[in-house]
Amino acid sequence: MLAGVAKESAAEMKWMKELIDEGKFVPVIDRVFSLEEVVEAHRYVDLGHKKGNVAVRVVPES
């Protein structure tokens, strides 16, 4: 598994923005964990159960 910072170009970012603006790109978020649950988030991903992306919320819910 590879990890790191993506190296997108300005043209690729513009293309991605256009897809989002047109509603043609829809991210799949499987679960959202709080920052306090980051250990559980890693465990969930490591177990291979996720069906989309897993997000970690770093600001308090309003």
Image: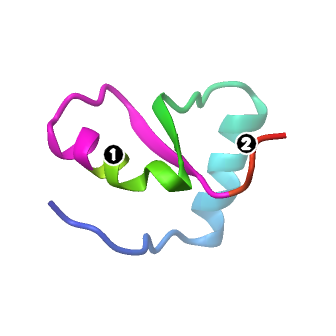
Number of residues whose C-alpha sits closer than 10 Å to that of mark 1, classed few (under 14), some (14–19) or many (20 or more): few
The residue sitting at 34% across, 54% down in the picture is 39
Name the residue tied to disc 1. Answer: 40
Q: Is residue 55 covered in magenta?
A: yes
- The kind of secondary structure element at disc 1 is helix
Residue highlighted by disc 2: 18
Quadrant for the N terminus in the image: bottom left
The label number, if any, that marks residue 14 in the structure image: none
Residue 49 drawn at (x, y percent): 21, 28
Circle 2: residue type: Glu
- As drawn, which residue projects farthest toward the right? 62
What residue appears at the point 59 percent right and 31 percent down from the top-left corner? 25
Q: Is residue 14 above or below residue 62?
A: below
44 over 15 or under it: above or below: above
Outermost residue to the front:
36
Between the C-alphas of marks 1 and 2, the distance is: 35 Å
Q: Number of numbered discs present?
A: 2
- What kind of element bears circle 2? helix
Give the residue at x 63% y 64%.
Answer: 11
| Disc 2: CA contacts within 10 A as few (<14), some (14-19) or many (>=20) | few
Amino acid at the residue labelled 1: Glu
- The residue positioned 20% from the left and 65% from the top of the image is 2
Quadrant in which residue 21 is drawn: top right
Nearest the eye: 52 or 58:
58
Q: Quadrant of residue 12?
A: bottom right
Residues at marks 1 and 2 touching, judged by CB atoms closer than 8 Å: no
Pick the front one: 30 or 19 = 30
The segment highlighted magenta reads 43-58
Judge whether residue 48 is colored magenta: yes
Residue 33 position, x and y percent, is 50, 41
